[in-house]
Amino acid sequence: MNELPVPATLRPAEREFWPDDHPRVQHGKIGVLLLNLGTPDATDYWPMRRYLKEFLSDRRVIEEPQWKWWPILNLIILTVRPGRKGKDYATIWNNEKNEGPLKTITRNQADELAQRLANHPNIVVDWAMRYANPTTASRIEALQKQGCERILLLPLYPQYAAATTATACDQAFRALMAMRWQPFVRVAPAYHDDPAYIDALARSMKKSLAKLDFEPERIIATFHGMPQKYLEAGDPYHCHCQKTSRLLRERLGIPKDKWLTTFQSRFGNDPWLQPYTDMTVERLAKEGIKKLVLVAPGFSADCLETLEELDGENRHIFEGNGGEQFAYLPALNDSAEGMDVIEAVVRRELMGWI
């Protein structure tokens, strides 16, 4: 019968029970694992295809019957879309590190959080992606090898959605299911209405607005969209987004008639959450609005959907329809305000462990 591995540190009275030839294991640590969506390993066809295949094969993301979705995905989308999306990624790619900005920012967030928690030497901070690399399973395994007997999972999605928060947790649970010796796990809840989050968004927006050379006539708070039927099936995401938007507007003291809440990044032909961001931007420009600001409170880090779609495509839509001054305000990212939110959530969820 196999015996248990020997802890890395033993009290003198315990040593007689553990033969010298037993392997030593690290123990006594607490892991914090930041989880985000993912980014392709490169912008050319095959890395993009692998990334899109994993992402669009997720039953949490695409809730279509397999018989219907498989031929659409494999015979049409994965033939055409990798090349087009690769070109989009290339416009925002971090060429210095040869990676997408989401990966750069999430790594920075983990590094900064580790520094902020440095007074707790038994805490180990790491990060992982739901799709592509570094994988969730590999980082959970790495944390356990460093002696983490308890792990806090923090999905970096302020608003809960099955297609983001739930699938990130699913992936972590799959990794745990394959482990003989599982660490004990907690999952941090969504923080869409957390005062620390709303305050950080407000402070960040004030800083960004102060740098502009114009006063916006309208501000759009835009969130990633989802099919309308997901809301009808009971997903709370739409309500979380609306509450975040309302609390942020009230915190900033902006009148209702100057603030809009919209949804972006729709995909396919089914109706998605409305109003749509791109159509709203076009409408405002045609109605004579000349100065417009977009902010994306649902993104903890800037990525393709904010840098290329919002600051690129929607800027062109606005200016091409008569708009004159446009600004996209950056996400919280690894700024002081963004890290204040992550630290506050982590410290609260670690209570009782530290």
Image (spheres, rainbow, N blue to C red):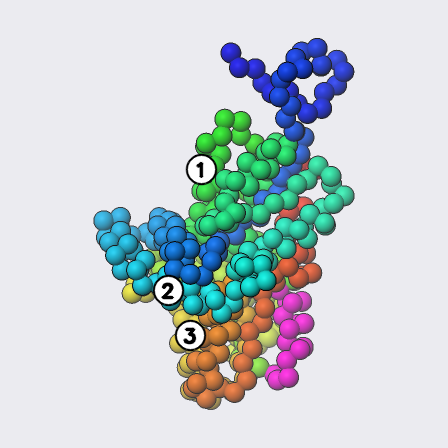
Specify the segment rendered in magenta: 201-215
User: Is residue 321 shown above or below 273?
Assistant: below
User: Residue 321: x and y, percent?
Assistant: 43, 86
* Earlier sequence position, callout 3 versus callout 2: 2
User: Is residue 145 shown above or below 163?
Assistant: above
- At 53% from the left and 30% from the top, the residue drawn is 182
Question: CB of mark 3 within 8 Å of CB of mark 1?
Answer: no
* Earlier sequence position, callout 2 versus callout 1: 2
- At 59% from the left and 62% from the top, the residue drawn is 96
Crowding at mark 3 (Cα within 10 Å: few <14, some 14-19, many 20+): many
Residue 174 is labelled as 1
User: Is residue 25 shown above or below 297?
Assistant: above
In 3D space, how far apart are the residues under numbered discs 3 and 2 (Cα atoms)? 23 Å
Q: Which residue is mark 2?
A: 83
- In front of the other: 321 or 81: 81
User: Residue 322: x and y, percent?
Assistant: 46, 88
User: Residue 9: x and y, percent?
Assistant: 71, 24
Crowding at mark 1 (Cα within 10 Å: few <14, some 14-19, many 20+): few
Main secondary structure type of the part rendered in magenta: helix
Crowding at mark 2 (Cα within 10 Å: few <14, some 14-19, many 20+): some
State which mark lies toward you, 3 or 1.
1
* Earlier sequence position, callout 3 versus callout 1: 1
At label 1, the amino acid type is Arg
Question: CB of mark 2 within 8 Å of CB of mark 1?
Answer: no
Q: Is residue 243 rendered magenta in the image?
A: no
Residue 261 is labelled as none
At label 2, the amino acid type is Gly
Q: Is residue 180 left or right of residue 64?
A: right
User: Residue 217: x and y, percent?
Assistant: 55, 83
At label 3, the amino acid type is Asp
In 3D space, how far apart are the residues under numbered discs 2 and 1 (Cα atoms)? 31 Å
